[in-house]
Amino acid sequence: MEKYDSEREKYYFEEEKSDVGRRSERGSRGGHGRLGERLPSAGAPADCGPSRALLLLLLLTLLALPAAGTLMVGVEVPTQVDGFLDESVNLSCQLKTPPGVSIQMSQITWMKQGEERSLAVFHPTRGPYYQDPGRMKFLAVGQGTKLPDASLELSALQIDDEANYTCHYATYPTGSSKGTTWLRVLARPQSSAVALKAVQPPTALSAPAPVAHCEAADGHPPARLSWAAHLPGVANTTQGPGSRPGTVSVVSVFSAVPSRQAHGQVVTCVVQHQTWAEPLRLPVHLSVLYPPEVSIVGYDHNWYVGRRDVTLRCAIQSSPAHTHFNWTTTLGTLPSSAQVQGTQLQIAVVDEAINTTFICNATNAMGTGQGEVTIVLRERPPASSSPGAIVGVVLGVLGIIVVVIVLLIFLCRHFHGRNQLNISTNGNVVYSTVRKEDVPLKDTPASNGGCIASPDSHHVD
């Protein structure tokens, strides 16, 4: 015996059965009543007259006509419909009939795969019935509608709504037609990526440790996670139930050898899901904890007694940041000429006390580090070879050369001003009076340096 969830649903099914029964009964009675005569017995002689041939031709014509409702009428539904968790979706269903065909709609029924109970039913006179009235409704039907659009809206989608849905049309005289749609319910994952604090081991030979964590929570279908990194490492990906029924959470952990070199590097978690056109990229800055690594900079191996304004700086690298540091020497105390200013050691004038080893100690939560430098003083300043000194020397030499050339020119002109030959207008050669002190030791071209007579020498007429 069939069971029904309500009197209205019972009425829909009984009404549909009664309609089918009445149509079958009318067809049976009409088949015999329209002939209005008894069929001939098997022993009666065959009638080969024109009426028999006419009846045979009519029967062949009727058999050649297409059966109503099988070729002319159909249900149009999409193959697949996508909906999102907590949102609404439209399951489209329409009855397609050819023009001029008169069809009477008896009932519309939506069924979900795996369930015997009707999801939604519409009857032209009794109206709609819903399994869950708060989440579903017909979009275009109403009482008195003869051939409605049977599209059904589902709201507040859940993952378990994902299934095949079948739309049934019961019509007269074409019978029943149906179409099936696959509803896929999608859930966008909530994605995040963070760095995991890792501790640098005391030895260089150590195994990889988790340094980054990436999660795509409450997705459907599950998201796919991968890592993009220049740092050598391995990824371990797992998945489990999400916080929402039917959803899946995916977790991926990236592991690498924790070291000072790995600290601050960037690795990227790449999340892919069917709800996104492009992958989601989540960068992560790695955080590796290690004790301070200390070095002292500023000594150029050219310190000597009397040099002024030199500086030593304590360079500290640590994670987390150092909380304490101090300067000292192998003798215990700093020279009086050295003054501490932050991480720097300022020395106004270098003296003999600076000829020692300076030490800088730094401490953080992971431990203590130390750096040192030994100062060796020179006895005298090294020869200056700065560009300024070289330019000064060159300019000095050039100045001396210019002065010598000018002096030679002046002496040459002064020495030969009174010893030039003067030619008279008649061509005779005369000599000017020369004092004894002006006569050179040797009156030869070599003795006067090969000087040429000056154009301003005196002429005697």
Image (cartoon, rainbow, N blue to C red):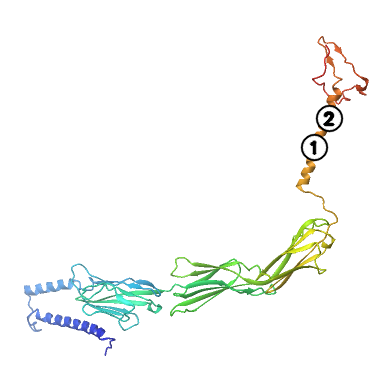
Q: Dividing the image into 4 quarters, which one contains the N terminus?
A: bottom left
Residue 41 sits in which quadrant?
A: bottom left
User: Residue 267 at what x, y percent from top left?
Assistant: 57, 68
User: Residue 43 at what x, y percent from top left?
Assistant: 8, 84
The crowding category of the residue bearing disc 1, from other C-alpha atoms within 10 Å (few below 14, some 14 to 19, many at least 20), is few
Secondary structure at numbered mark 2: helix
Q: Is residue 287 left or right of residue 437?
A: left
The crowding category of the residue bearing disc 2, from other C-alpha atoms within 10 Å (few below 14, some 14 to 19, many at least 20), is few
Does the image show residue 450?
no
Q: Is residue 164 left or right of residue 228?
A: left
Front-most of residues 442 and 80: 442
Q: In the displayed structure, would residue 372 be above or below residue 154?
A: above
Q: Dividing the image into 4 quarters, which one contains the C terminus?
A: top right
Amino acid at the residue labelled 1: Gly
Question: Counting residues from the N terminus, which is met first, the one under dot 1 or under dot 2?
Answer: 1
Residue 275 sits in which quadrant?
A: bottom left
- Measure the C-alpha gap from mark 1 to mark 2: 15 Å
Amino acid at the residue labelled 2: Leu
Looking at the image, the residue that sits furthest to the top is 426
Residue with the mark numbered 1: 399
- Residue 96 — which label? none
Does the image show residue 226?
yes
- Residue 408 — which label? 2
Q: In the displayed structure, would residue 401 be above or below residue 355?
A: above
Q: Residue at x 11, y 81 (%)?
A: 32
Secondary structure at numbered mark 1: helix
